Each structure stands twice: as structure tokens, then as C-alpha cells.
Image (cartoon, grey):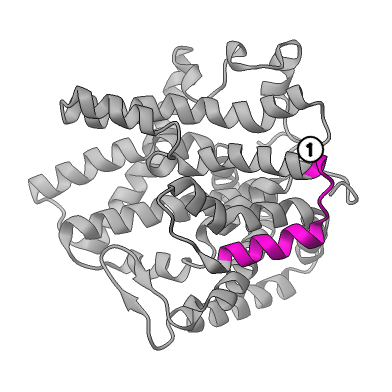
Amino acid sequence: MSSPNRMPWVDTAKGLSIILVVMMYSAYNTGEYTGSVGFLHYVIGFATPFRMPEFFLISGLFLSQVIDRPWRRYVDRRVVHYLYFYVLWAIISIGLKIGIFSRDPAGMLHDLAMAVVQPYGVLWFIYMLAVFGVVIRLLRELRVPHWIVIPLAAALQMWAPKPDSYAIEQFAAYFVFFYLGFVLAPLIFRLVEWTQARPVIALASLLAWTLVNGLLVYSPGYAMQPVGMQMGLAAWPPLHLALAIAGAVALCVAGGFLSKFASMEWLRWLGEHSLVVYVAFTIPMSIFRGVMLASGLLTDTGLLSLAVLLVSVISPVVLYFIVKRIGFGTFLFERPAWAHVDRPNAAKASSKPIPRPAPEAA
């Protein structure tokens, strides 16, 4: 059961998000090795406009709870928290992939050094959350109004620059969604609450959104590829931005709708522990996919992508329960006391659930 201080629909929406993220890597990485397209490619293709924007928007919903805390406490909660998991799992991932499997100590040291300034692999999301936390706090300190930040962030997203810096590229692509989550939190909470009380309207709205999003993504001009896709009309920057925001809000509404069903408790739990899956899914993904391709037991791209998805989601959860059971290795998924900079409140900060923000908080 969830904590009474948590909001089930938020965790359910996060559960949908983490599945979409793992699905993308499962489908595209499998397609890269098989050289073909499977049915999951089309599912994740539909989600292309909103897959990562929704994750960032939800991450910004509770920022108003901590934005005005003293700098030390704020940095502990919104910066050090994410950097701890980023550094830990970057070391684990690079050590396994480059140091052990590739037996390239020099390459391992190079990648470890580069990971400081360039987000490493799938961990870029956690890296950027820490960066966004610092930037928004600075904007708050400088009293820069929302009406200036939002248009500039939106313009940056539509411009979509491709500099040499991956960090700058990802900042441009996703900062607007994190910021909108922060600013629009009261409106989004009210919308989800309103639709939860009107399930027929919620379902009809979601079906209408699905139709519009699908038609625009798969309109003339789209091209599905083993790795990635080219959208149709949805690729036009202003429309792409609008679909990203609409899709992010739609997944919040979907989270509110699904959270009412007891059968969706597993999805809520998965969202509550999405960090567990996010930091660890690539390792079992690579191992399982390699074994299947080498053995020839499963060669169909669609079925193999689905199997990779299931293994990639379930394996970190199994590891999490093993760690919790034996009481060793909890540092893999829970930040230890020594990794806090706000030490007097460390124990409480690491275990206290996030409460629902007041309507006027953002």
C-alpha cells in the first residue's frame, strides 16, 4: 500500500513513464542488433512527443514544496540526491561495460572523467534533474518572472540546438517541461482531481487525445526505423511542443484514472520506485538481449523487444527486494546518511514521503 502522504495518481503516472522509457531502449536497442522493426517500435513511436517531457513535468510538480527552503537543505534534496545516484551508477555501469566486459582500463578512466561534464548513457535524466534544480533556484533568487522564463524555454526547445555538449542539448530539449511542472502544478492537480470524479469524461478525453496524437505522429512523412523514428506533422517544432505538453498532461489524467483500480497497484508501486528501475535496467537488458541473440532462441524483433522490456523492468525490482531482504547493498537504491549535506535532517529527509502541495504553492 502507498503512504497516506503520497498521491497515488502521481506514482501511477510515473509508472507509465518508466515503462515507456524502458520500452524505448528495449525496442530501439533490439532493432539496432536485428536490423528490423517490431510492434513495440510503433507503440513507442506513438509516445515520441511526450515520453520524456512527461517524466520531467511530473518531476517538477513538487518543486514548490522545497524551492524556498534554505540553500543547504534545498541542495541536499534537489541536487545532491540526484548526483549521488548518478555518480554511483555511472561508476557501476562504466566499470562493468568498459572496465570488465571490454577490458579497457584507459577507456574506463576516460569515460569516468567525461561523465562529470557530459551526462553518461541513460543516466542523463538524473544528471539533468540536478542541473534543473540549480537553475530554477537561481531564477527564483533573481526573481525572474514566469512570463519571461516560459517563452524563452519554449523557444529553446523548438530551436533544438545540437551543440557539442550533450548536457546543453538536453537542457534545451527538456527544461521547459520541468519548469512547466513547477509553475502549473496547482492547475494540473486540480485537473486530475476533476477528471477523477468524472471517469467517463476522463476516458473520452484520453481517447480523443490518443486519436489526435496518433494521427499527427503517423501522418504522411513519418518513417519507422530500427533505431528511432521520423514523425509526420508532429515533427513541426511548435506542434511537437504542443503535443509534448498535451501528452504529459494526458498521462497525468491517465494516472488519475488508473489509480482508482486496485488491479493497478503494481503500476503505482513501480512509479513510486521508478528510480530503482531507471538506474539499473540497462545491465540486465544488455545481458538478456545478448544471450537471446547468441542462442537464437528468440529472434523475432517484436517478441524479443517485449521479452527484453519485461526482463529490464522486473530484474531491478527483484534486485531491490533481495537487497532489502538481506540488508546489504541498500546504498544502491537509498541514499545513505553520509551522502547528505544537510546532516541534521538527513534521516528525516531520506525517509519522509512527499506531501501534496497546497493549491497556491506554485
Residue 177 in the image: state x and y as whole percent.
64, 57
- Whether residue 145 appears in magenta in the rendering, the answer is yes
Horizontal side, residue 270 vs residue 111: left or right? right
Q: Residue at (25%, 65%) from the top-left corner? A: 226
Q: Is residue 266 above or below residue 354?
A: below
Q: Residue at (16%, 54%) from the top-left corner? A: 298
The quarter of the picture where the N terminus appears is top right
- Whether residue 329 appears in magenta in the rendering, the answer is no
Task: Say which quarter of the image contains residue 196.
Answer: bottom right
Task: Say if residue 129 shows up in the picture.
Answer: yes
| Magenta span | 140-157
Q: Amino acid at mark 1?
A: Ile
Residue 110 in the image: state x and y as whole percent.
29, 29
Q: Residue at (39%, 55%) from the top-left corner? A: 23
Q: Is residue 154 above or below residue 26?
A: below
Task: Tell me the crowding category of disc 1: few under 14, some 14 to 19, or many 20 or more residues within 10 angstroms, Cα based.
Answer: many
Q: Say what secondary structure mark 1 lies in.
A: loop
Q: Is residue 38 above or below residue 261?
A: below
Residue 131 in the image: state x and y as whole percent.
60, 39
Q: Mark 1 highlights which residue?
A: 67
Q: Is residue 139 above or below residue 150?
A: above
Residue 247 in the image: state x and y as whole percent.
60, 67
Task: Say which quarter of the image contains residue 45.
Answer: bottom left
Q: So how many labels did they put on this image?
A: 1
The kind of secondary structure the magenta stretch mainly shows is helix
Q: Residue furthest bottom?
A: 220
Q: Residue at (83%, 35%) from the top-left corner? A: 68
Q: Residue furthest left?
A: 295
Task: Say if residue 304 shows up in the picture.
Answer: no
